[in-house]
Image (cartoon, helix red, strand yellow):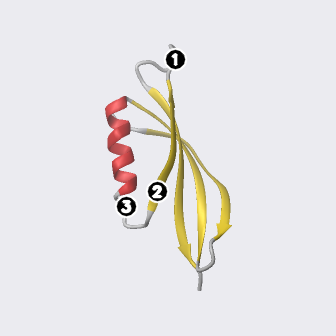
Amino acid sequence: RRVEVVSIRPEAIEDRGNYLELSIRIDVKSRFREMGDYLLMLENLPRAIRIKEVKMETNASIGPDILAHLQALTYIGKE
């Protein structure tokens, strides 16, 4: 089984002096175990990505899958 990306959308860009902080909302659907693998993969990408928030939900229409709402932060250097 795999992770299905439902949506990805930018939320905000904050100026942090020497760099910009980009907030991204990612909604994904998968089984619980695959969700853990997906989060680990995100945090091990070459570009710095920090998972700031994770909210998970399930209901009868998507069971046994879960729907996760992630807030990820990444950083862009200024030139």
Task: Give the Cα distance between marks 2 and 1.
Answer: 28 Å
Query: Image height check: is 50 above or below 20?
Result: above
Q: Earlier in the sequence, mark 2 or mark 3?
A: 3
Residue 78 rendering spot, x and y as whole percentages: 59, 81
Task: Give the Cα distance between marks 2 and 3.
Answer: 10 Å
Decide if residue 76 is on the left or right side of residue 38.
Answer: right
Q: Residue at x 43, y 65 (%)?
A: 48
Residue 73 rendering spot, x and y as whole percentages: 53, 58
Mark nearer the viewer, 2 or 1: 2
Residue picked out by circle 3:
45
- Amino acid, disc 1: Asn
Secondary structure beneath dot 2 equals: strand
Residue 26 rendering spot, x and y as whole percentages: 54, 45
Q: Residue at x 45, y 60 (%)?
A: 49
Q: Residues within 10 Å of mark 1 (few under 14, many from 20)?
A: few
Residue picked out by circle 1:
59
- The foreground one among 79 and 60 is 79
Q: Residues within 10 Å of mark 2 (few under 14, many from 20)?
A: some
Residue picked out by circle 2:
50
Residue 71 rendering spot, x and y as whole percentages: 55, 48
